[in-house]
Amino acid sequence: LSMNNYFIFDSVQDLIELIKKGEVSFEEAAWENISDEAKDLVSRLLNKNYKKRYTPAQALAHPWIKKVKKIFLYFQIKL
């Protein structure tokens, strides 16, 4: 969404450690123009707890996805 690489790492091991932490922050400037709904979806998709993490069906039912679908349909953009 922000077109930036969220994970900044020096080695594969560093990347693995970042993923294990499961911390998501939207404080960076790259996220300042991203809607709260979009950030909510990203947070739910990246939830470390698999029982709370969104399933594909839940993601597709998320308000942000529904809004994007309407925009794509309006401009006749194929997904």
Image (spheres, rainbow, N blue to C red):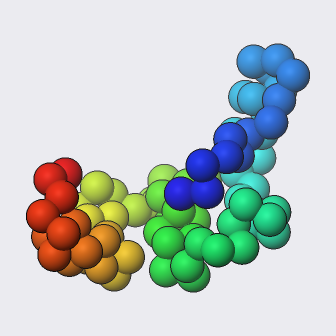
Q: Nearer the viewer, residue 44 or 77?
A: 77
In this rendering, the count of numbered labels is 0
In percent of width and height, residue 14 lies at 83, 26
Q: Is residue 44 above or below residue 67?
A: above
Residue 20 falls left or right of residue 39? right
In percent of width and height, residue 12 lies at 75, 18
Residue at the limit of the structure toward the front, as seen here: 75
Residue 16 falls left or right of residue 34? right
Q: Residue at x 38, y 76 (%)?
A: 64
Is residue 51 visible to us here?
yes
Q: Residue at x 40, y 62 (%)?
A: 54
Q: Residue at x 81, y 63 (%)?
A: 28
Is residue 47 visible to us here?
no
Quadrant housing residue 49: bottom right
Q: Nearer the viewer, residue 41 or 34?
A: 34
In percent of width and height, residue 16 lies at 73, 28
Q: Is residue 37 above or below residue 60?
A: below
In percent of width and height, residue 4 lies at 67, 46
